[in-house]
Amino acid sequence: MSNKLKILVPLKRVIDPLLKPKISASKIDLTGLKFTTNPFCDIALSEAIQLKEKNSNLVENIHAVSIGSAKSKEILVAAIAKGANSASLIETEKSVEPLAVAKLLAEVAKQQKSNLIMLGKQSIDSDANQTGQMLAALLNWPQATFASKVEVSSDGTSVEVTREVDGGSVTQKASLPMVITADLRLNNPRFVSLPKLMKAKKTKIDTKKIEEFGTDITPRLEVEKVEEPPVREPGIMVNTVEEFVAELKKRGAL
Amino acid sequence: ASTLAFLEYSGDKISSNSLSALSAAKQLTYPITAILAGSQIDGAIETLKKVDSVSEIIAIKDKKYDGSLSEPLAALLADTVKKHSFTNVVAASSSVGKDTFPRLAALLDIQPVTDVTKVLTTDTFVRPIYAGNALETVKTKQPVNIITFRSSAFTPAASGDGNANVEVETAAPFDGPQSEITKEEFISTGLPDLGSAKRVVSGGYGLQSKENFEKIIYPLAEKLGAAVGASRKAVDEGYCDNSLQIGQTGKVIAPDLYIGIGVSGAIQHLAGMKDSKVIAVIDENAEAPIFKTADVGLKADLNSAVPKLTELL
């Protein structure tokens, strides 16, 4: 039974994807806004849980981890309620770049003896799309990014992943351990029921300060400013198809 | 300082995404060495030689790079950077660039800057965050700067009378983790490529069915010589292939003309098309948020207005 899956699912707490951030004094201002689990992370978690439900003898456990403020506990509690076995928080008030996040996650993967890491392909705030690939490099594991389908072999030794790429899809196969990043169409995450959420609140979330890891999290990049994108000139409404064509011609688009 | 540009190709052609990355790389002002890797690269080398901005080409003729798997490719690029002491490594923010470059960066212990839309100086870049609702200006001063460029923000480099020197190199053996490709499915619509087309016709949930999507969107796209795109909802409903999705998680486009048909305009979709030069929208629902971003809007029944538009053009 050496091939049991120990799945690690990193989760990020982000602004509700339906909201726009405010920008003031050349910085992002998120005060008063609603937060949630990054949608792509939620899809990755949901896939891990479905793997466990479908192959209970194959999956030993699912551990959820987040790096962020104490408030990130909320998304870890939700992860437990959804079906993760355990969760831990690496607490920091600082903004941590993907390279440092990947280094911290590599430490967690070693501690947890994880052999499969499933995470979102990008977070909807920084839109970096880097962490999974960097984590795979640091661990020297194969990677399958932008997954739309994941199939574990019946003996739990290899995984076949269909990936969404420019112009179509590619199916890639690798042996465990590996890193998979979830794309939008991998699954539709389920909502969690209130009783489950209440029960999950009793689970202990192992919390460590980021400094305890001894990983250098000094930013490599300097963010000089954040600004609003240029505003478009207001457009016009027309009443007929003929006017529509005339307006497009006027604008040199036809 | 010097720049290594990783380029993608298909047959004799350098990908349009990569040619855009070359234009962006030129703005870094350093001499550009391009690298091509794979078993069938002779045609692409000949094409690339003529591109003015490239001063040197490193050719790696090796089949382990066919299919562009990130594990061997990132290792090759890391080795090449070290061997020639490049100070910048760039690529397009294509699916291969997105897959490989962060892996390359971690191998070199570098924090990359991905999806850049503007070069301000040789080390300062603008990139969209929060689905394009904010623009971040970042400075990178690392021993190697690793950058991917969003293709829609840069005009592809043109062919000229360049005459780049070609160095054929041999890759070091790769003993890292192995993936293998078991299946590839690429969709061809017979229309221009969505990522680089000058005109795009995009269909949304308002089309109500796959049949209607095909009946209404394709004839208009053909008439305009436009690429076909779609909203996430249209893709999720199965109206078209997911490689046609425009948005924060799909293709990001900036054509001269975008025509949205029955697209409501979720912020994730707007993230993918709001830099289009002219945005025109036809929808039945005057309250659709996309009208706020449109230059020209028409509230009308799609099923009669769009065929009429196709006929008028």
Image (cartoon, rainbow, N blue to C red):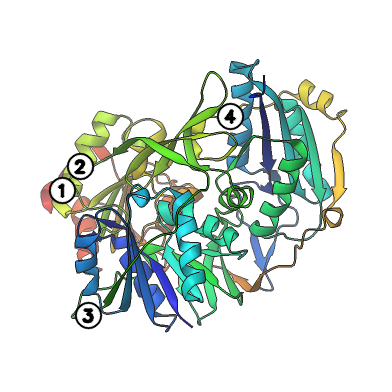
Q: Residue B162 bears which disc, if any?
A: 3
Distance from the alpha carbon under mark 1 to that under mark 3: 35 Å
Amino acid found under the numbered disc labelled 3: Gly
Please, what secondary structure does the residue beneath circle 3 have?
loop
Quick one: label 1, few (<14), some, or many (20+) residues within 10 Å?
some
Q: Chain of mark 3?
A: B
Residues at discs 3 and 4 in contact (Cβ within 8 Å)? no
Parent chain of label 1:
B
Identify the residue shown where x is 44% and y is 57%.
Answer: B97
Query: Residue B242 at x, y = what percent?
Result: 37, 39
Question: Are callouts 4 and 1 both on one chain?
Answer: no
How crowded pointer 3 is (Cα within 10 Å; few <14, some 14-19, many 20+) is rated as some
Question: Considering depth in this image, is A17 or B27 the residue closer to the camera?
Answer: B27
**Mark in the foreground, 4 or 2:** 4
Identify the chain of the residue marked 4, using the numbered disc in the image.
A
Distance in Å between CA atoms under marks 4 and 2: 35 Å
Question: Which amino acid, by three-letter code, is at mark 4?
Answer: Glu
Residue B284 percent across, percent down from the top left: 34, 41
